[in-house]
Image: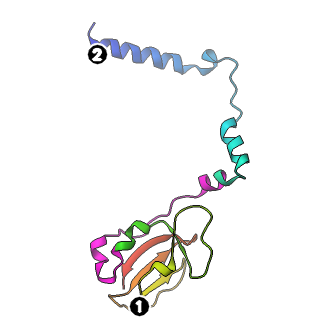
Amino acid sequence: MTRLHHLALGLVLVLAGCEHNEKTFPNFQFTGKVPMLDSLSESVGGRIDEAMQERPAKIRLPVLPEMLVGCRGHVLVPALGMRLVERGKEPPSQGQFIREERLTPPYRVIPYGARVSMEQSPQRLSVELDQRARIIGLYCG
């Protein structure tokens, strides 16, 4: 037999052993809990559950740094997905964030669901936020 035949035979035997879980592990019953994660979650006050439930930010538009040079937004491309902390507000206890004070004027912050005026200024950076105040869009205008 060739090496390929030996490999195929080994794969068939492995898959055959995995096929019937109740025969291989007759006393195993899955309870739906993972003891190590459950105890860790309890020790840090449930913050792991919160972090695991939070979905990553969906970036609204393709952001090309070269298109943001005119309004100095190219330096903020790495901040996509981070929370924007308003002036004078406390930053979140966990996760990445950027303070509004770090933005260079002129800029405008567009909160989730806000209406935007049609007024355009090529030197102004527009920072678009989602429901959780995460940066999902950057554009000049």
Q: Residue at x 67, y 54 (%)?
A: 47
Question: Around disc 2, counting alpha carbons within 10 Å, would you say few (fewer than 14), some (14 to 19), or many (20 or more)?
Answer: few
Q: Which residue is drawn at 53% across and 79% down?
A: 111
> Which quadrant of the rendered structure holds the C terminus?
bottom left
Furthest residue in direction top, as rendered: 1
Disc number placed over residue 17 in the picture, else none? none
Q: What residue is shown with label 2?
A: 4
Side of 33 relative to 2 (left or right) = right
Q: What residue is shown with label 1?
A: 118
Q: Quadrant of residue 65?
A: bottom left
* x then y, percent, for residue 10: 40, 14
The residue type indicated by label 1 comes to Met
Can residue 34 be spotted in the picture? no
Q: Residue at x 47, y 87 (%)?
A: 116
The residue type indicated by label 2 comes to Leu
Side of 69 relative to 78 (left or right) = left
